[in-house]
């Protein structure tokens, strides 16, 4: 596998790096501290083209390749996991519309999603349903040319500001996916506050009380809502979280290199202590390995290889685990300073922990990857 | 063509599920694979046989067994031939 970047990919990385340093870095700590992404930052993200970067060009998206999208996500994740999570949910939900929407649905929603004029969120989790998505309790009943949807969705990333939701419900026991407007009658949106990490992601709980959704808003076929629509979206989400986690590791390494060069203890710089050097080495290895897995996943996705889905799971599992490891060591290396909020490493640890849970917990990925391990020799 | 398609699908599925199953066995109903495998099967048939799974094709009925996959691939290939598109099997 050749993972040398093309000229355009290198240029894209440089553009993303400059943009995040200029537009996101000054806000990242405040977004975390206040648990809100300010409208000014949201407007910048909406207007810069990142939200639609990987969406189809013929609908107004950027149509960038998988590696470029990964690079973009890594750079944003390196600076601010909250805004990275906006990119993640918007892209994964819009990709589901691009894959499963019919011509009219695509024409109706994708141009605004590509341009960032509208934001779409992913509404699958419920108060009592997380990893076992097949068990969703939100119900849809047929009512003429519409469905009536009732139930509750929880942990909906950027649900407080989303214009549209891709909502999963069961119709006579069969999962379906629906695109629902924010201002639908009977839909009540309330904030989920005081979250541990990715604190600026403006989580919402959605209460559906007999919300009327026209049948022309259904994505895919009845019964395929989870197995195909949700899984395709989650596959995109995992790819994004894998790269974002790799960005967190890079941020930890950046912070620890700087701190170990500046901080002195017992008359010596931290970087001159062997155990500190071991931590730096481990972070470097974790970052390099995570990024390599992300590149591998991107290359397989680009050529639509069958194993791309599982290799994306592998990359997400490894990168999110490695990010927690790197961030934990980063906090320890900073000592009390690392727990103070004066330095960014405690944010990295909290954000990394959340990255290990969203789009499939470590344990869910372990189960899937174990099955993959048992048959992988054929695929390679 | 049928034998070739069937043999390649049988090989892929049997290695994936780790057991010798019948062509009509529903690999999802039997719990032999997880839900992510459905996505893998879509990209498998697309890359292996050069067919395109359209939105309306994304129904688990087309991917749940060796027999269903063979029927799906052959139907898609026939449609492509009828439309004047070329199908290549290796």
Image (cartoon, coloured by chain):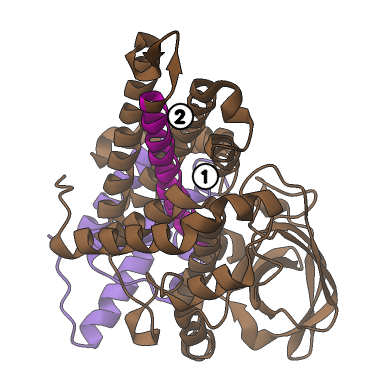
Q: Are marks 1 and 2 on the same chain?
A: no
Do the numbered discs 1 and 2 sit on residues whose CB atoms are within 8 Å?
no
Q: Secondary structure at mark 1?
A: loop
What is the chief secondary structure element of the magenta stretch? helix
Q: Residue at x 28, y 57 (%)?
A: A67
Q: Where on the picture, by quarter, is residue B84? A: bottom left
Q: Which residues are magenta?
A: A232-261
- From the top left corner, tell me how far across and down residue A261 is, in percent: 35, 26
- From the top left corner, tell me how far across and down residue A37 is, in percent: 63, 62
Of the numbered discs in the image, which one, if any, rests on residue B34? 1
- State yes or no: residue A235 in magenta: yes
Residue B34 visible somewhere in the drawing: yes
Crowd band around label 1 with a 10 angstrom C-alpha radius: few (<14), some (14–19), many (20+): some
- From the top left corner, tell me how far across and down residue A208 is, in percent: 82, 71
Pointer 2 chain = A
- Farthest residue to the front: give it: A267
Q: Please identify the quadrant where the N terminus of chain A is shown.
A: top left
From the viewer's perspective, tell me whether residue A51 is left or right of residue A150.
Answer: left
Colour seen for chain A: brown
What residue sits right under mark 2 in the picture?
A: A326
């Amino acid at each position: 596998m050749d993972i040398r970047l093309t000229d355009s990919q290198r240029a894209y990385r440089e553009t993303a790096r400059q943009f995040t340093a200029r537009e996101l870095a000054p806000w990242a700590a405040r977004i975390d501290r206040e648990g809100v992404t300010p409208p000014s930052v949201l407007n910048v993200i909406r207007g810069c083209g990142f939200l639609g970067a990987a969406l189809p060009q013929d609908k107004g998206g950027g149509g960038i390749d998988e590696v470029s999208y990964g690079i973009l996500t890594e750079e944003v994740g390196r600076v601010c996991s909250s805004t990275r999570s906006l990119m993640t949910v918007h892209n994964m939900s819009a990709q589901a519309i691009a894959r499963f929407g019919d011509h009219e649905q695509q024409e109706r929603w994708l141009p605004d999603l590509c341009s960032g004029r509208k934001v779409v969120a992913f509404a699958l989790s419920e108060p009592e349903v997380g990893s076992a998505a097949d068990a969703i309790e939100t119900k849809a009943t047929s009512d003429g040319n519409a469905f009536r949807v009732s139930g509750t969705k929880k942990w909906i990333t950027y649900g407080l500001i989303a214009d549209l939701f891709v909502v999963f419900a069961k119709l006579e026991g069969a999962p379906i996916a629906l695109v629902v407007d924010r201002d639908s009658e009977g839909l009540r949106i309330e904030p989920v506050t005081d979250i541990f990490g990715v604190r600026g992601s403006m989580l919402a709980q959605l209460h559906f009380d007999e919300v009327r959704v026209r049948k022309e808003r259904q994505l895919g076929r009845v019964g395929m809502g989870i197995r195909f629509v949700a899984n395709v979206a989650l596959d995109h989400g995992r790819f994004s979280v894998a790269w974002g986690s790799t960005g967190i590791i890079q941020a930890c390494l950046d912070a620890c290199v700087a701190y170990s060069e500046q901080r002195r203890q017992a008359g010596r710089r931290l970087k001159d202590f062997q155990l500190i050097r071991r931590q730096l080495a481990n972070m470097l290895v974790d970052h390099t390995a995570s990024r390599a897995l992300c590149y591998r996943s991107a290359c397989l996705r680009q050529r639509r290889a069958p194993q791309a889905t599982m290799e994306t799971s592998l990359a997400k599992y490894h990168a999110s685990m490695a990010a927690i490891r790197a961030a934990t060591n980063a906090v320890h290396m900073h000592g009390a300073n690392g727990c103070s909020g004066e330095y960014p490493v405690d944010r990295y640890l909290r954000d990394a922990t959340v990255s290990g849970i969203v789009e499939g917990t470590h344990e869910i990925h372990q189960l899937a990857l174990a099955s993959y391990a048992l048959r992988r020799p054929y695929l390679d | 063509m049928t034998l070739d398609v069937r043999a390649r699908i049988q090989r892929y599925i049997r290695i994936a599920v780790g057991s010798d199953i019948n062509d009509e066995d529903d690999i999802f109903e039997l719990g032999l694979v997880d839900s992510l495998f459905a996505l893998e099967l879509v990209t498998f048939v697309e890359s292996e046989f050069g067919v395109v799974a359209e939105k309306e094709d994304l129904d688990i009925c087309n991917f749940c067994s060796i027999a269903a996959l063979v029927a799906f691939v052959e139907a898609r290939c026939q449609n492509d031939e009828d439309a004047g598109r070329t199908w290549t099997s290796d």
